[in-house]
């Protein structure tokens, strides 16, 4: 498994976790829990952005890792 593939899988996993947090926030009636889930989703969205920037950098530096 290439670095590019591993990074792509990591991004997908973090995106999935963020989506779960957003779903939990919508489903709960507890305002404190809702706020916690929303904050976690926001943090995970930031992590996705960071990982995608890293992915772009790797693809620019090492074209062999570029996903097809």
Image (spheres, rainbow, N blue to C red):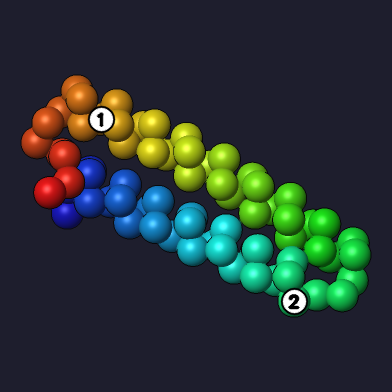
Other residues around mark 2 within 10 Å, as few (<14) / some (14–19) / many (≥20)? few
Quarter occupied by the N terminus: bottom left
**SS under mark 2:** helix
* Number of dots carrying numbers: 2
Q: Is residue 30 left or right of residue 47?
A: right
Other residues around mark 1 within 10 Å, as few (<14) / some (14–19) / many (≥20)? some
- Asked where in the image residue 12 lies, by quadrant, the reply is bottom left
- Residue drawn at x 15%, y 39% is 65
Q: Is residue 3 left or right of residue 40?
A: left
* Residue 2, percent from left and from top: 17, 47
Query: What's the distance in space between the residues labelled 2 and 1, CA to CA?
Result: 38 Å
Residue underneath mark 1: 58
* Residue 8, percent from left and from top: 30, 51
Q: Residue furthest top?
A: 61
**SS under mark 1:** helix
Vertical position of residue 50 compared to residue 25: above or below:
above
- Asked where in the image residue 43 lies, by quadrant, the reply is top right
Vertical position of residue 30 compared to residue 58: above or below:
below
* Residue 18, percent from left and from top: 57, 58
- Residue drawn at x 29%, y 26% is 57
Residue underneath mark 2: 27
- Residue drawn at x 73%, y 70% is 26
Q: Nearer the viewer, mark 2 or mark 1?
A: 2
- Residue drawn at x 90%, y 62% is 32
The mark that comes first in sequence, 2 or 1, is 2
């Amino acid at each position: 498994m290439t670095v590019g593939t591993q990074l792509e899988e990591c991004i997908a996993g973090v995106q999935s976790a963020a989506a779960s947090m957003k779903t939990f926030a919508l489903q709960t009636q507890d305002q404190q829990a809702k706020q916690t889930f929303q904050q976690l989703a926001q943090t995970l969205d930031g992590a996705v952005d960071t990982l995608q920037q890293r992915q772009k950098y790797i693809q620019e530096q090492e074209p062999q890792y570029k996903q097809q």
